[in-house]
Every structure is written in structure tokens, then in C-alpha cells.
């Protein structure tokens, strides 16, 4: 977990929770202190991480773009395999344009990733996004996707978007990394998000997918995603107090950090493997050794 959590967020956790925050059990009472972090302090740190990301965006954008520090920034970074549907949000261009160019509540989308050289449908998706980015200034395709860019994306994006076809997502580790940094996930209930989702720390894209009719599923889920952004996500981001801080949003950031850091880390994975597999397996071997006919 310390590999992907921004140093600024890690410093906050060290100060409020403890220097060994990454190694504490989820039930440890010290985790309650995450909710005592001042909203202004967390929002300021997020702003620093967002500025750092957008500075890198200026260098990595496929075409020159003017980025907006104050706009709701959606991050999408992963392999461009067709089932991950990087172009789901592009299905209704007029509706997308209206969402992006709202003068009072603007949105910008950062796309990053690569397709396999032999994956022609995936390469077609990349080409479609690059083409849109050349026409729409608030859609940005970032070239040369690598670990540095991935780290800045998961640390600085306001929203992490993940919309694969249900039942096909293996895990979704980028969403875990974003959530640990206070990014709020907007995702289909698949992979890790099917276990992690709570209304207080992100949003679930409505889906009744069966995989029998992919075109119908895609259309319905695109509609659900547009509606979710228009009615819930964007209003929540721009609902500010007198100091310009989105208090409900920041409370969701705190909930995301606490839940994801404690529940979706390599530490938990190793402990789960030990408790559910290695430990019982070792005990069973010892039981077998005691049998009269044990030949080991």
C-alpha cells in the first residue's frame, strides 16, 4: 500500500492514525482518526496532487490541451481491451458534450492506456478516443502510459471510472489505488468493487447485464452512467461551503481512504491466504502425519 499512496496522504495517515498505519488491522480503533482529518487540510492536499497530475498531463497529452484545475476530473487508465469499454461514455456525443462544457460545473476526462498490438478492436477504441480528443478540448488522451503516469492518475484524479462488462473484470487494482488516495470510484459492480462498494465512498453504475445481449447492455449502462454523473456525481463535487470545500465529497474521500487502505491491500491478501489456505493446509498435513498408514 505505501507504494501507491501519495507521500502527502501517507504523512496524514502517519500523523492521525499512526506511523504503522499500513500494517494495522481494519478493526484497530486508531482508524477512527481518519474522520478527524480537517476537511480543509485533506482538500488542500488533494488539490496539490491534482495540480501535479495536470502538470504531467500538459506534457503527456496526445494533442495540446488547456487543463482546468477546478473542473471535475475523471481518470480512466488501463488496458484498452474491448470488454473494458473505454468508449462507453462516448456513446451519446451530444449528452457528453453538454456534460463537459457546462460553464458552471465543467468536467474533463483523462484517458490513458494501451491496447495489445494484435487487438484490432482495442486499437480501434484508442483511435476513436484520440479522434475525439482532437475535437473536444475537455477529453484528453495521454500518451506513453507507464507507471509514473499511472501513479499520478490514481493520486490526483477526482473520480476513477471503471466500466467493464460485468462478470469479465478480474479485479480492478487501479480503482483500489485511487480509492486509497481519496479518489472516488464510479464503477460497475464487478471485480473488487462488487465487494468494496458502499454508498458513502463511491458510486455503482446500474447494470442488469447478462452477457446475452451486449449491445443492449452497453446502451443501458451508458444511460445509467450519464444519469449517475449528471444527477449525483457532478452535483456532489460542486456542492461547496462558504470556503469552497465540498464537505460531503471530502467525507466520502475519508471513508474511501479508510476502507480501501485497510481492506484492499497486499497485507490483507497474505493474511487471507494464510487463514483460508496455507494455515488449514499445514494443519491437515500434520493430522495426516499422525495416521498409522502415513507414508510421508
Image (cartoon, rainbow, N blue to C red):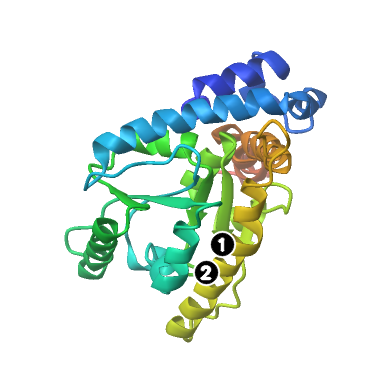
Considering depth in this image, is 14 or 55 the residue closer to the camera? 55
Question: Can residue 18 be spotted in the picture?
Answer: no
Q: Residue at x 28, y 42 (%)?
A: 145
Horizontal relation, residue 128 to residue 284: left or right = left
Question: Can residue 255 be spotted in the picture?
Answer: yes
Q: Residue at x 62, y 55 (%)?
A: 233
In this picture, is 296 found above or below 112?
above
Identify the residue under disc 1.
Answer: 190
Q: Residue at x 47, y 70 (%)?
A: 95
Residue 244 place in picture, x, y as percent? 65, 34
Considering depth in this image, is 74 or 238 the residue closer to the camera? 238
Q: Residue at x 47, y 77 (%)?
A: 218
Horizontal relation, residue 224 to residue 197: left or right = left
Disc 1 to disc 2, how far (Cα)? 6 Å
Q: Residue furthest right?
A: 29
Residue 85 place in picture, x, y as percent? 40, 66
* Element under disc 1: loop
In this picture, is 219 found above or below 251?
below
* Mark number, residue 166: 2
- Find out whether the residues at labels 1 and 2 contact each other: C-beta distance under 8 Å: yes
* Label 1 environment density (alpha carbons within 10 Å; few <14, some 14–19, many ≥20): many
Amino acid at each position: 500500500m505505501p507504494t501507491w499512496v501519495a507521500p502527502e496522504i501517507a504523512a496524514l495517515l502517519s500523523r492521525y492514525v499512526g506511523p504503522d498505519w499500513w500494517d494495522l488491522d481494519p478493526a484497530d480503533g486508531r482508524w477512527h482518526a481518519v474522520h478527524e482529518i480537517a476537511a480543509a487540510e485533506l482538500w488542500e492536499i488533494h488539490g496539490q496532487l491534482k495540480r501535479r497530475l495536470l502538470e504531467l498531463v500538459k506534457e503527456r497529452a496526445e494533442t495540446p490541451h488547456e487543463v482546468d484545475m477546478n473542473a471535475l476530473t475523471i481518470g480512466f487508465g488501463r488496458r484498452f481491451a474491448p470488454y473494458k469499454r473505454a468508449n462507453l461514455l462516448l456513446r451519446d456525443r451530444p449528452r457528453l458534450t453538454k456534460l463537459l462544457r457546462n460553464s458552471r460545473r465543467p468536467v474533463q476526462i483523462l484517458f490513458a492506456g494501451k491496447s495489445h498490438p494484435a487487438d484490432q478492436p482495442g486499437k480501434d477504441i484508442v483511435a476513436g478516443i484520440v479522434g475525439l480528443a482532437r475535437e473536444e478540448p475537455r477529453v484528453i488522451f495521454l500518451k506513453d502510459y507507464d507507471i509514473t503516469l499511472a501513479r499520478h492518475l490514481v493520486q490526483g484524479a477526482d473520480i476513477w471510472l471503471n466500466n467493464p462488462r460485468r462478470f469479465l473484470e478480474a479485479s480492478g487494482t487501479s480503482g483500489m489505488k485511487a480509492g486509497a488516495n481519496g479518489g472516488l470510484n464510479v464503477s460497475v459492480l464487478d471485480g473488487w468493487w462488487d465487494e468494496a462498494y458502499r454508498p458513502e465512498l463511491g458510486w455503482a453504475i446500474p447494470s442488469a447485464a447478462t452477457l446475452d445481449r451486449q449491445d443492449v447492455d452497453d446502451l443501458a449502462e451508458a444511460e445509467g452512467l450519464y444519469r449517475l454523473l449528471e444527477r449525483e456525481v457532478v452535483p456532489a463535487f460542486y456542492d461547496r461551503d462558504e470556503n469552497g470545500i465540498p464537505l460531503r465529497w471530502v467525507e466520502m474521500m475519508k471513508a474511501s481512504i479508510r476502507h480501501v487502505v485497510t481492506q484492499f491491500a497486499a497485507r490483507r491478501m497474505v493474511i487471507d491466504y494464510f487463514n483460508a489456505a496455507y494455515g488449514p493446509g499445514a494443519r491437515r498435513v500434520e493430522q495426516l502425519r499422525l495416521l498409522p498408514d502415513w507414508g510421508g
